[in-house]
Amino acid sequence: TPKLTIKDLHVAIEEKEILKGVDLEINGGEIHAIMGPNGTGKSTLASALMGHPKYEVTKGSVILDGEDVLEMEVDERARAGLFLAMQYPSEIPGVTNSDFLRSAVNAKRGEGNEISIMKFIKQLDKKMAKLGMDESFAERYLNEGFSGGEKKRNEILQMMMLEPRIAILDEIDSGLDIDALKVVAESVNSMKSPEMGVLIITHYQRLLNYIQPDFVHVIMNGRIVKSGGPELAEKLEAEGYDWVKEELGIED
Ligand code: ADP
Ligand code: MG
Ligand code: MG
């Protein structure tokens, strides 16, 4: 089963230190949620793990199944089984959704091991049906004119097609109405298996009503300052983040 180990991770953006020593271990079968106030470095963690060039790792280590992730290029990270559903997926003009997904699947499988078109379409149809997506969606241009909910469903579709070892879902609930939220959550729940670990990043507790995390972590000032079970998310929902700040003696 997969294992991602993050140790003392420090990340800077344009010389400014954002993450100041993050420690986290995610194993296959586990769902972890990271919560925290806006601007505390949640998305920075996701971007750094995926190797975004703007995010400079200045200290610490990230190991996936014994391999040094920080030594890998972005495409190697994807091939090793890391997946990021982004907070703001971008439009790529002229590329259909189906084309994009197939090249992502093939990039992951590697040269000489490409999936046959028939098999790909069969899988795609099945997974789109599961997500309640219309068939026409496959032939639409990537993200062009997609609604917020369609974009999110599409990210989950991508995850279902790629079958990552570690999935990082950054704010997948933002902009979703309750029905779309339920569909997205059910899909993530249905993928729960020892073969995949999940990191859910969210500002609000709402998503965690539908995807039950095994572990909840609070990030503040670039560090994980508190960890617990699902009850921690409930307490944050009810009481906000101030009590954590007080407990830690953090000033605004
Ligand atoms: P969160 O996801 O928790 O809301 P972020 O990780 O997006 O927080 O941001 C953490 C801090 O890093 C913020 O102060 C933000 O302004 C800064 N930051 C994030 N991305 C960039 C960027 N690309 N360029 C400059 N500053 C950034
Ligand atoms: Mg933010
Ligand atoms: Mg963010």
Image (spheres, grey):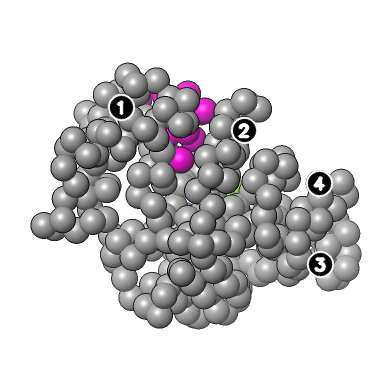
Kindly identify which residue carries mark 1: 138
Look at the image and give the residue range highlighted in magenta. Answer: 144-156
Q: Residues within 10 Å of mark 3 (few under 14, many from 20)?
A: few
Q: In the image shown, does 215 or 244 lie closer to the viewer?
A: 215
Q: Residues within 10 Å of mark 1 (few under 14, many from 20)?
A: many
Kindly identify which residue carries mark 4: 237
Please say if 85 is above or below 198.
above
Q: Residues within 10 Å of mark 2 (few under 14, many from 20)?
A: some
Q: CA distance from mark 2 to mark 4?
A: 19 Å
Q: In the image shown, does 99 or 183 lie closer to the viewer?
A: 183
Instruction: Tell me which residue sits at (60%, 58%) in the image.
Output: 31
Tell me which corner region of the image, top left, top right, bottom left or bottom right, holds residue 113.
bottom left
Mark 4 or mark 2, which is nearer the start of the sequence?
Answer: 2
Tell me which corner region of the image, top left, top right, bottom left or bottom right, holds residue 78.
bottom left
Instruction: Tell me which residue sits at (49%, 72%) in the image.
Output: 3
- Residue 116 seen anywhere in this rendered image of the structure: yes
Q: Amino acid at mark 2?
A: Lys
Furthest toward the left, the residue is 112
Kindly identify which residue carries mark 2: 182
